[in-house]
Amino acid sequence: MHENPISKEIVDAAFKIHTKLGPGLLESVYEILLAHEIKCRGLLINFNEELIRNGISRVVNGLEE
């Protein structure tokens, strides 16, 4: 599967969760639900991967190496 179909599945999963539950939950709740929904769609995911966490933090905070 290429990047665009994978991205579509992830965005669709996030939209489904947000549509059903709305805003206001803790980020950790959305993370667990998104991981479950992505796994149900047959994609592999590991939110606990340190590289992903540091990478996202670096992007959000505008840090560069």
Image (tube, grey):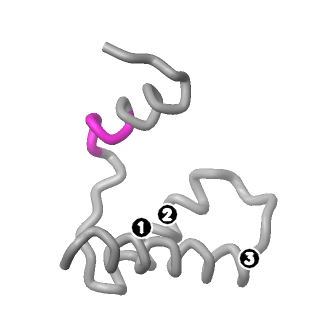
Q: Secondary structure at mark 2?
A: helix
The disc at residue 32 is 2
Quadrant in which the N terminus is drawn: bottom left
Q: Amino acid at mark 2?
A: Ile
* Disc 1 packing (10 Å; few <14; some 14–19; many ≥20): many
* 63 in magenta: no
Q: CA distance from mark 2 to mark 3?
A: 13 Å
The residue where tag 1 is placed is 35
| Horizontal side of residue 13 vs 40, given as left or right | right
Residue pictured at 80% horizontal, 59% vertical: 24
View extreme (top): residue? 65
Q: Secondary structure at mark 1?
A: helix
Q: Amino acid at mark 3?
A: Leu
| Horizontal side of residue 48 vs 56, given as left or right | left
x and y, in percent, of residue 52 in the image: 32, 41
Q: CA distance from mark 2 to mark 1?
A: 5 Å
Q: Which residues are magenta?
A: 49-53
